[in-house]
Amino acid sequence: MLLAIDTSAGTAVAIVDDDGRMLASRSTPDTRRHAEVIGPFLAEVLAEAGSAPLTGVVAGIGPGPFTGLRVGIAAARAVALARGVPLHAVPSHDAVALDRVVGGVAAGRFAVVTDARRREVAVTVYTAQLPVPVVLEPPHLIARAAFAPAHDVPAYEVAEIPAVELARVAQARLAAGIPLPEPAPLYLRAPDVTLSSPKRVTG
């Protein structure tokens, strides 16, 4: 079984078997309750999926806001460490891209879009290929009002990332020998809160 966790938008948790079949899933589009729901979601999907051992944990690494991403990645690290299984990282937009391609919705060039707040969106442009869509333009921020004229491609905006597809991306890339990125959060802007520089004391 492979456990997938994403908190780049809402909070999504899922478990799939070795064939990519969903065994359990929980999600919410709420962007302000990551820390509150992640624990119950994990307990529920692990209980629902049964006693088969986990073979790995997948963390969605964004793009997304600073606080939200930290919650999901920290949870994924903790479960992987506790279960003694590998931790895999997948860019969150890749899950949406795979879902659209496998579902026959996307073909050719297309974009995946998530809200980045501050009247901006996070955008990744893909070309529809399998086993996984190929990134043509890596994640970047753009003003929401400017997105449509700047990208003449079909765009799919989502409020939450499908954790099931996150796991399937990891499975597809591992099976094809396609490297996965490091499990580090993908921030497109600096965090809102930063440490102040220490004041120099003179005397």
Image (cartoon, helix red, strand yellow):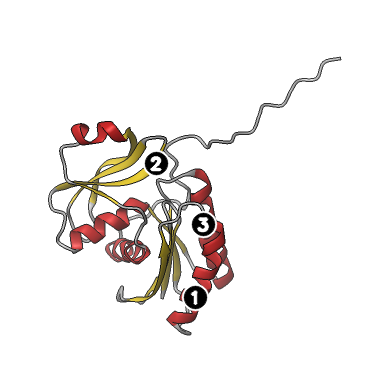
Q: Residue at x 76, y 20 (%)?
A: 200
Disc 2 is placed on an element classified as strand
Q: Classify 149 as above or below 180.
A: above
The residue most toward the top is: 203
Q: Which amino acid is tagged 3? A: His
**Disc 1/disc 3 C-alpha distance (Å):** 15 Å
Residue 21 is situated, as x and y percent measured from the top left of the image, at 31, 76
Q: Classify 8 as above or below 39.
A: above
**Numbered label attached to residue 34:** 3
Disc 3 is placed on an element classified as helix
Q: Residue at x 17, y 53 (%)?
A: 128
Q: Which amino acid is tagged 2? A: Ala
**Numbered label attached to residue 116:** 2
**Disc 3/disc 2 C-alpha distance (Å):** 16 Å
Counting residues from the start of the chain, the first of labels 1 and 3 encountered is: 3
Q: Is label 2 in contact with label 1 (beta carbons under 8 Å)?
A: no
Q: Classify 147 as above or below 110.
A: above
Q: Classify 64 as above or below 57.
A: above
Counting residues from the start of the chain, the first of labels 3 and 2 encountered is: 3
Q: Quadrant of the N terminus?
A: bottom left
Q: Residue at x 37, y 53 (%)?
A: 92
**Numbered label attached to residue 44:** 1
Near mark 2 (Cα within 10 A), the count class, few <14, some 14-19 or many ≥20, is many
